[in-house]
Image (cartoon, rainbow, N blue to C red):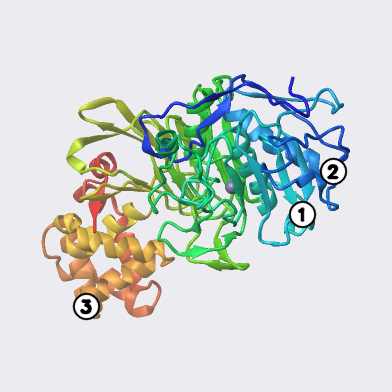
Amino acid sequence: MPTPYESSEIRFSDLAKDASINALLGGTQWKDDTISYSYPSSNSGLLWSQFFNGYGSPFGNGEPWSSSFKPLTASERFNFEKALQQWANVADIQFVQVAETPEVVGDIRPAYTSDPDGSVLAWSYLPSYSPAASDIWINTQSQLNREEWNPGSMSFETLMHEIGHSLGLKHPFYDGSSSKIEYQDEIEGEDENEGDDDDDDDDEDDLFDSVLPDSLDKVSYTIMSYTYADLEGEEGTGFSFHPTTPMILDIAAIQYLYGANDDYHAGNNTYTYTDAQTYHETIWDADGTDAIVYNGTIPSLFDLNPAGGSVIGQSVYVQANGIDLGLPVPNVWIADGVTIENVTAGQSDDILIGNHGSNILNGGLGIDTVIVEAPRNQFSLSKSINGYTLSEKDESHNQDTLINIERLAFDDYKLALDLNGHAGEVAKIIGAVFGSNTVSNQMYVGIGLSKLDDGLSYEQLAALAINAAGLSDHDEIVALLWKNLFGSAPQESDISPYVNLLDSGDITVGGLTALAADSSFNVQNINLLELSHTGIAYL
Ligand SMILES: [Zn+2]
């Protein structure tokens, strides 16, 4: 057990093969996978080392000795333990609380002290043999002393960030501090150790000097970053709702150091999202057949690819001083290496993207589109009892079941599958007004779909098609419909009853055209049954 004068055993981290992991490695880590923490209740000299490797000179800033030292409140402890748990969920580590005595303290010791710069939220120390190692100091001058530390707040993200340091993770950018791994002083927003590098072991230093490229140095990928930016690069000062878990690169790095938590969500799990709260998280799931289910009404995007980002439910924005910037950012990520098999989308028009395994993609209500990031000819599509089966020809394990999916977008080709919905209505109207051969006109199909999807009724679209065919004379309209249905020009006696209905106003042009479109003759002409097996191509 660590004491006020001595930390637990540490070890020096090995470099990884993955550069994005190395960019987060501080160089040291705890040797044991059980890591202790404690809540200092006072700055009594009995509980803190004043020696040179403790909080005496030159180590640290003498934090315990500040008159602003104070312990965490009960609710702060509650959220601090939630933040610890977020790391224990993903890595093979356990946190145990110990009660502080002059003989025993925890390795991680959170408490308040002060830094006059209120933008410095908190800081902590990497694992080392100093008794200050892994201690977390909250700045009394910062917003953490003024707001609840609930998940989603900047404060909660800050706790997870500092715990990341306490476990051996560094910032993924060059922060100007000494890279001396024994002394690394991580002060948020400050470069206190600039020019302080008098370590002669430069080789060791250089190993742990790598940084992430700007494209990855974002809080969306790692909470060890300082950069709040959306995927287009627009930069702000925070999120409207902050991450509540370590993110993709954090999970990869902490699992590299301590191993993965293989017991976490190892069974079949359903991740249910609703509109009642906001989410910003990365899913770590050890095993099983898993599903994302969204019971909500906000148009959403679901991407099941490992390291993919989904936009689900209440929007999360990058903010600059409280003002939303740009588009909503992905707010539910899947950790690299994690397989979530199935998704059930919400009640609006949603976008679904499967992974390279077999997925059940259920669009729910609305006009839902499955995006396939490959050309059409790599896949075969067949009708099943409750939807479609989409199979990658050369990858037998990539076979998706599509349910309640109205549209399928390949890289080079779009298919409408809702032949019992809008696509069927469009095909029937095109067949009746322009002839069955025109059903293959992808532009016409695309125009018709966009009109119906935008809210035009079947009869309104039928009237629009007659208009587009350039007809207004009732004789000509009925003759056109007759010819397209029966293949030959009508006799006067064939069409006069229908012309009379139009002339008297008993039926509208749109209404009569819709009747013709729905007739079994037209349905056979356009081979609606066959279309329902293949889908209908559109632009
Ligand atoms: Zn930091």
Q: Secondary structure at mark 1?
A: loop
When asked about the image quadrant of residue 100, the answer is: top right
- Residue denoted by label 2: 71
Q: Does any atom of ligand 1 lie closer than 8 Å to the CB of label 3?
A: no
Q: Secondary structure at mark 3?
A: loop
Instruction: Judge whether residue 279 can be spotted in this image.
Output: no
Q: Are marks 1 and 2 in contact (CB under 8 Å)?
A: no
Pick the front one: 262 or 341: 262
- Residue denoted by label 1: 114
Lower sequence index among marks 1 and 2: 2
Task: Tell us which disc is closer to us: 1 or 2.
Answer: 1
- The amino acid at mark 2 is Pro
Instruction: Sort mark 3 into few (<14), some (14-19) or many (20+) by Cα contacts within 10 Å.
Output: few
Q: Does any atom of ligand 1 lie closer than 8 Å to the CB of label 2?
A: no
Residue depicted at x 81% and y 23%: 104
Q: Which mark is residue 471?
A: 3
Lower sequence index among marks 1 and 3: 1
- Report the Cα–Cα distance between label 1 and label 2: 12 Å
Residue depicted at x 56% and y 55%: 191
On screen, residue 51 versus residue 70, left or right, reads left
Residue depicted at x 78% and y 34%: 49
Instruction: Sort mark 1 into few (<14), some (14-19) or many (20+) by Cα contacts within 10 Å.
Output: many
Instruction: Judge whether residue 104 can be spotted in this image.
Output: yes
- Residue at the far left: name it: 488
- Report the Cα–Cα distance between label 1 and label 3: 81 Å
Q: As displayed, is residue 88 above or below residue 72?
A: above
Horizontal and vertical percent position of residue 373: 28, 44
Q: Secondary structure at mark 2?
A: loop
- The amino acid at mark 3 is Leu
